[in-house]
Image: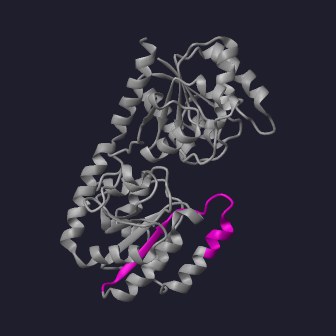
Amino acid sequence: MRILQICGGPSWGGMEMQTLQIARELREMGEDVHIFCSAGSELEKHAAEDGMDFTSGLFDPDTGIFPSVKACKKLLKDFRPDVIHCQRSHDLSVISTALRRVGSKAPLFFTQRMELRRNKKSIIHRRIYSRVNRFFCVSSFVREGFIKYSPAKPHKTFVMNNGVNLSKFDPGRHRKDMMIEKFNLPEADLYIGMSGRISPMKGHQDFIEAAAIVSEKSRQKIHFIMAGPASVGEDDFAAEIYRFAKDKLNKGNYTFIGFQSDLSEILTPLDIYVFPSHRESFGNVLIEAMAMKKAVVAVNAGGVSDIADCGINALCVQPQAPEEIAESILTFINNKEQREQFSEAALKKAQTFSREAFIENLLKEYRSFTSQ
């Protein structure tokens, strides 16, 4: 099956990473996969490094929709895809126009990864979206808003949660003592951490405030870890977070760790994982922490409800409530048996989000249209 994956995003975020990962995994399963991306983008760079077949020309720098449609038409004629999967809404205008102009009947799939909060029901949007055969949303939360604000029909719109590589996020993959040494972490009774780009919505300030409360109330020696770089354009905010931590926490009680290509390494030392993000469309990193058998404290907002079963495999709190986060952390600190019980339940739930099952479901959807 010839599969065309489309993403014109210029940066290297979750959407672009997912595009490449899906393409790579489909290729490993023997499918003929091609990526359509933007010239000079991070996706183009990583696709080249991976030896993936790709074509640039999709919203290249300083170009608009018409050159993109022209490039897309040529690609459709040359590659003749059996299936097309668009990963970014901005690119739908290009692919839907190009498909109509070349007269292609190839089924078009689209994945909505972000919460939709503005109306997209204009005549133009209706025409663009009418060419899509099936819509996928990464969570029930995203699907609800997508149906409300877009022209997508409910019977064409399905939830398809992202999958996690369970062999990579395996609690037995790394030794805890070796990871403590690798990251130069001080000796502690418990390690508590969070991960994510430093951005206002990720909840770093809430985590730091909660850490300060826990440090004051607990007699145990606890070290707090925050893993992740500053978001693009958010260097000033990151500097504020570093200052806030310095003001709130004792020196030596916390560690900031930048970008990690293998998050499983820094998850390994943790006894408790905190997911303080105010509003996530889904929350891949939450599943990754659960797959690493961590006791989880999570903000119950957005797509988290598809992952966390509150009171069973996670202690849930309200958004922007550092006191609640602190109390939940203290609950785990003071009750080792409960902490172990929740970590076991977290692992069991994470195993339902395997990457293999995700790719198999995706291929099943593709084939349901190509066999018609």
Residue beneath the point at 55% across and 83% down:
246
Residue 23 drawn at (x, y percent): 50, 31
Answer whether residue 58 is visible to the viewer in this image.
yes
In the image: residue 23, left or right of residue 311? right
**Image quarter hosting the C terminus:** top left
**Total numbered circles:** 0
In the image: residue 83, left or right of residue 174? right
Q: Residue furthest right?
A: 62
**In this figure, which colouring scheme has been used for the structure?**
one colour
User: Is residue 165 positioned above or below 235 on the image?
Assistant: above
> Between residues 49 and 318, which one lies in front from this camera angle?
318
Residue beneath the point at 24% across and 62% down:
342
Residue beneath the point at 44% across and 58% down:
301
For residue 64, which quarter of the picture? top right
For residue 271, which quarter of the picture? bottom left
Residue beneath the point at 55% across and 46% down:
114
In the image: residue 110, left or right of residue 220? right
In the image: residue 101, left or right of residue 140? right
Residue 146 drawn at (x, y percent): 53, 40
Instruction: Magenta stretch: give its range.
Output: 220-240
> Between residues 107 and 154, which one lies in front from this camera angle?
154
For residue 158, which quarter of the picture? top left
> Between residues 359 and 255, which one lies in front from this camera angle?
359
Residue 16 drawn at (x, y percent): 57, 42
Residue 33 drawn at (x, y percent): 52, 24
Q: Is residue 222 magenta?
A: yes
Answer whether residue 37 is visible to the viewer in this image.
no
User: Is residue 310 positioned above or below 43 on the image?
Assistant: below
